[in-house]
Amino acid sequence: MNPVRWKCFSLVCAVCAFANCSDKFGSLEDWLGVLGASDTPRVLTFTPNSESTEVNPQTTISVVFSHPMSIQSCVSGFSLEPQVRGSFETTEISLKFTPKTELPSGGYIARLTKQCEDKNGKDLDRVYTVSFRVGEKEVPEAPTVGSIIVQTGTEAECFNGGSPSDILLGEVSSGCVGVPGPPPIQIRFTKPMNQTEVGLGLRMEPNVSFRLEWMNPSEVKILPDSIFSSNVRYHILLPAGVHSLDGSVLSATFRRDFFVGSVSDPEVIGFGLESQNCGLGIQEFGSITGARWDSGFCFWSLGLPILDPHSYQFRGGDDGTGTNSACADVNTDNFRIFFNQYMDTTSVIGATRFSKISPPSSNIRLSTWVWSHCQTVSPYGCRELTYSYAESEASCNGPLFGNISTGGDFNLSASNLAPNFYPYYEFRLEAEAKSILGKRMKNVFVIQVEAK
């Protein structure tokens, strides 16, 4: 047979090694019958080829024979140096060795001895020795943290949510404490990450309880369960060894920090009446000369002096008739106070005092109160409060304070006929009132007003 035809036979037989040949090429037995014209079995193909370089670490070693073989003898006659554990897949005319793990880079020698026999007991025509070299496995680039976004700003800016800042771009010294709501921290990685490993390894110091919300495999949000403390430096840490989805690992422990800015002490920034339509975002300004219950501005606001009681006049809501009409709430004696910060509602109510000072009242009670400008997320808190008071001397109450027949009173005594400079009341908010950050007011807030 000439060399060209032999090359064709070898190619066809190699193709047929692991599948049935089609009818137009004849059966596998037909081709083996032709090839078997030579009594001695031989190797038709051996892969990888001898002297191959940069062989893939996941390669398999395959041999195709010219004769049906006693294939177990060929398995016994096969060796690979250095030794590698693996498994065999065989047919009568083929042998494939698959290493159990990827082959380390370096040189290898695959050998098939004459112990390999065909089904008639004839040895392989010679010893086959094939040398090849496995190239270096391409190592993917290690993942890194691409950005860490925290909310920053002045105290007023932080109250409005703050502005995003990347702590990888420079020192952050004005982080927001988290009012309103604990501020999220957004981390972007340079590669899709193993989310379980990130969740187990990521932590903050000082310790902060949080949960993670993945936006995509490369971006995650840290959602703290509580606000941050002011004047504290927080560290974000991720240990080395955390994997990305392509198998590469974070090569070194990642650590970055940011500083949460200071927060001022809570204080009263305005005081007036509900009837003045006075409050945050409506009419926040007091008067330098004083105001009445029907004025279009507050009694007082931050930055103004507190005037004498005669300058601040309200009207008692009780009409003096002693009927049910005297009991209905009237807003000319509903006092309103507002703050520079979100306040702890319980501590504010507990720190509130209201009394008549000329002449002294026998009994004044807080009937009800309404908070507004409140947060809807933790740690909640509000910035504006409206008080409704009941006075035992009001005509609605009759002989008993809060008489069940009238449903109680929500007004102070009638004052429409009161003479000038009489009577005076005092509103007092003790320093025990706290913000939601736990800070107390530095000073007691006291203001005296006149009923007219």
Image (cartoon, rainbow, N blue to C red):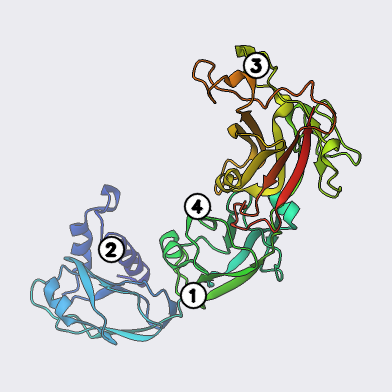
Q: Dividing the picture into quarters, in which one does residue 66 lie?
A: bottom left
Disc 2 target residue: 13
Q: Do the residues labelled 2 and 4 touch (CB within 8 Å)?
A: no
Q: From mark 2 to mark 3, how far is it between C-alphas?
A: 110 Å
Q: What element carries label 2?
A: helix
Residue 75, percent from left and from top: 17, 76
Q: Can residue 162 be seen in this view?
A: no
Which one is in front in this view, the residue at disc 4 or the one at disc 3?
A: 3
Which one is in front in this view, the residue at disc 1 or the one at disc 2?
A: 1
Residue 432, percent from left and from top: 61, 54
The three-letter code of the residue at mark 1 reads Val
Q: From mark 4 to mark 3, how far is it between C-alphas?
A: 56 Å
Which one is in front in this view, the residue at disc 2 or the one at disc 3?
A: 3
Quadrant (top left, top right, bottom left, bottom right) of the N terminus? bottom left
Disc 1 target residue: 139
> Local crowd at mark 4 within 10 Å, few (<14), some, or many (≥20)?
some
Disc 3 target residue: 326
User: How many numbered marks are there?
Assistant: 4
Residue 389, percent from left and from top: 63, 31
